[in-house]
Amino acid sequence: MDQSRAPVLEALAAYRRRGDISFTPPGHKQGRGVDPRVLDVMGADLEAVAEAFAAAPDAKGVIVASPVDYGTCGDLEGIDEVCRRHDRTFIVDEAWGAHLPFHDNLPTWGMNAGADLAE
Protein backbone atom coordinates (compact mmCIF):
# COMPACT_ATOMS: atom_id res chain seq x y z
CA MET A 1 0.00 0.00 0.00
CA ASP A 2 1.44 3.37 -1.05
CA GLN A 3 1.04 5.85 1.80
CA SER A 4 3.33 8.54 0.41
CA ARG A 5 0.30 10.61 -0.66
CA ALA A 6 -2.73 11.89 1.21
CA PRO A 7 -5.43 12.29 -1.48
CA VAL A 8 -8.10 13.69 0.85
CA LEU A 9 -5.71 16.27 2.28
CA GLU A 10 -4.53 17.15 -1.25
CA ALA A 11 -8.13 17.64 -2.36
CA LEU A 12 -8.86 19.88 0.63
CA ALA A 13 -5.75 21.95 -0.09
CA ALA A 14 -6.78 22.36 -3.75
CA TYR A 15 -10.31 23.32 -2.69
CA ARG A 16 -8.90 26.02 -0.42
CA ARG A 17 -6.49 27.34 -3.09
CA ARG A 18 -9.35 27.71 -5.57
CA GLY A 19 -11.36 29.76 -3.05
CA ASP A 20 -14.49 27.70 -3.63
CA ILE A 21 -17.60 28.63 -1.71
CA SER A 22 -19.22 25.53 -0.32
CA PHE A 23 -22.83 24.74 -1.11
CA THR A 24 -24.55 25.25 2.22
CA PRO A 25 -27.89 26.69 3.28
CA PRO A 26 -28.37 30.27 2.06
CA GLY A 27 -27.11 32.99 4.33
CA HIS A 28 -23.82 31.59 5.54
CA LYS A 29 -21.33 31.25 2.69
CA GLN A 30 -18.40 31.45 5.08
CA GLY A 31 -19.52 34.79 6.55
CA ARG A 32 -20.01 36.52 3.22
CA GLY A 33 -23.61 37.46 3.92
CA VAL A 34 -26.94 36.60 2.45
CA ASP A 35 -27.26 36.53 -1.32
CA PRO A 36 -29.71 39.30 -2.33
CA ARG A 37 -31.60 36.78 -4.48
CA VAL A 38 -32.30 34.72 -1.36
CA LEU A 39 -33.66 37.79 0.43
CA ASP A 40 -35.94 38.45 -2.55
CA VAL A 41 -37.46 35.00 -2.11
CA MET A 42 -37.28 34.48 1.65
CA GLY A 43 -37.56 38.05 2.88
CA ALA A 44 -35.84 39.70 5.80
CA ASP A 45 -38.80 41.73 6.98
CA LEU A 46 -39.80 41.21 10.60
CA GLU A 47 -43.34 41.98 9.58
CA ALA A 48 -43.36 38.50 8.05
CA VAL A 49 -43.71 37.27 11.63
CA ALA A 50 -46.71 39.57 12.14
CA GLU A 51 -48.16 38.38 8.83
CA ALA A 52 -47.76 34.78 9.98
CA PHE A 53 -49.69 35.63 13.16
CA ALA A 54 -52.46 37.19 11.04
CA ALA A 55 -52.56 34.12 8.80
CA ALA A 56 -52.69 31.76 11.79
CA PRO A 57 -54.63 33.60 14.50
CA ASP A 58 -54.64 30.52 16.76
CA ALA A 59 -50.84 30.43 16.87
CA LYS A 60 -49.60 30.80 20.43
CA GLY A 61 -46.11 32.01 19.58
CA VAL A 62 -42.90 31.55 17.64
CA ILE A 63 -40.04 29.07 17.93
CA VAL A 64 -36.85 30.26 16.26
CA ALA A 65 -33.56 28.37 15.83
CA SER A 66 -30.77 30.91 16.25
CA PRO A 67 -28.00 30.52 15.54
CA VAL A 68 -28.44 27.70 13.09
CA ASP A 69 -25.73 25.08 12.86
CA TYR A 70 -24.01 27.14 10.17
CA GLY A 71 -23.70 30.16 12.47
CA THR A 72 -26.41 32.44 11.08
CA CYS A 73 -28.26 34.36 13.80
CA GLY A 74 -31.72 35.83 13.58
CA ASP A 75 -32.83 39.29 14.68
CA LEU A 76 -34.03 38.03 18.04
CA GLU A 77 -34.74 41.47 19.49
CA GLY A 78 -36.84 42.35 16.45
CA ILE A 79 -38.75 39.07 16.59
CA ASP A 80 -39.33 39.59 20.32
CA GLU A 81 -40.75 43.04 19.63
CA VAL A 82 -43.23 41.60 17.13
CA CYS A 83 -44.20 38.84 19.59
CA ARG A 84 -44.81 41.39 22.36
CA ARG A 85 -46.89 43.55 20.03
CA HIS A 86 -49.11 40.52 19.32
CA ASP A 87 -49.03 39.12 22.87
CA ARG A 88 -47.40 35.87 21.72
CA THR A 89 -44.79 33.62 23.29
CA PHE A 90 -41.24 33.73 21.93
CA ILE A 91 -39.02 30.62 22.24
CA VAL A 92 -35.45 30.39 20.94
CA ASP A 93 -33.73 27.09 20.21
CA GLU A 94 -30.09 27.97 20.85
CA ALA A 95 -28.55 24.53 20.59
CA TRP A 96 -25.71 26.08 18.57
CA GLY A 97 -25.47 29.27 20.64
CA ALA A 98 -24.49 28.28 24.16
CA HIS A 99 -21.40 30.50 23.82
CA LEU A 100 -23.28 33.71 22.91
CA PRO A 101 -23.77 35.18 26.41
CA PHE A 102 -20.07 34.94 27.23
CA HIS A 103 -18.71 37.75 25.05
CA ASP A 104 -20.04 41.23 24.27
CA ASN A 105 -18.97 41.07 20.61
CA LEU A 106 -21.17 38.04 19.88
CA PRO A 107 -24.78 38.33 18.77
CA THR A 108 -27.43 38.74 21.45
CA TRP A 109 -28.64 35.48 22.90
CA GLY A 110 -32.32 34.72 23.37
CA MET A 111 -32.70 35.58 27.05
CA ASN A 112 -31.09 39.00 26.60
CA ALA A 113 -33.27 39.59 23.55
CA GLY A 114 -36.40 39.10 25.65
CA ALA A 115 -37.33 35.53 24.75
CA ASP A 116 -39.73 33.77 27.08
CA LEU A 117 -37.58 30.65 26.89
CA ALA A 118 -34.18 29.87 25.40
CA GLU A 119 -33.28 26.23 25.26
Image (cartoon, rainbow, N blue to C red):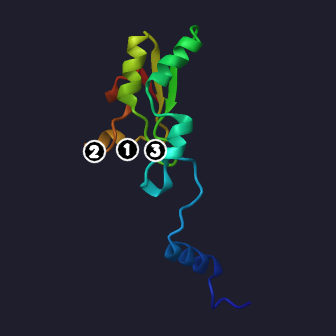
Q: Position of residue 82 (x, y in %)?
A: 41, 18
Label 3, secondary structure: give it: loop
Going by the numbered disc 3, the residue's amino acid type is Thr
Q: Nearer the viewer, residue 33 or 81?
A: 33
Q: Which numbered dot is residue 23?
A: none
User: Residue at image x 54%, y 67%?
Assistant: 20
Callout 1 crowding tier (Cα within 10 Å): few <14, some 14–19, many ≥20: few
Q: Is residue 81 above or below residue 37?
A: above
Going by the numbered disc 1, the residue's amino acid type is His
Going by the numbered disc 2, the residue's amino acid type is His
Distance Cα–Cα, label 3 vs label 2: 17 Å
Between label 3 and label 2, give the one nearer the viewer. 3
Callout 2 crowding tier (Cα within 10 Å): few <14, some 14–19, many ≥20: few
Q: Nearer the viewer, residue 112 or 51?
A: 51
- Please give the residue where the numbered disc 2 appears in the rendered image: 103
Q: Position of residue 104 (x, y in %)?
A: 25, 42
Q: Position of residue 8 (x, y in %)?
A: 63, 76
User: Residue at image x 43%, y 9%?
Assistant: 87
Q: Nearer the viewer, residue 116 or 1?
A: 116
Q: Which numbered dot is residue 72?
A: 3
Q: Is residue 101 visible?
A: yes
User: Residue at image x 47%, y 47%?
Assistant: 34
- Please give the residue where the numbered disc 1 appears in the rendered image: 99
User: Residue at image x 55%, y 35%?
Assistant: 42
| Residue situated furthest right in the rendering | 1
Q: Is residue 44 above or below residue 102?
A: above
For the N terminus, the quadrant is: bottom right
Label 2, secondary structure: give it: loop
Q: N-terminal of the two: label 3 or label 1?
A: 3
Between label 3 and label 1, give the one nearer the viewer. 3
Number of on-image labels:
3
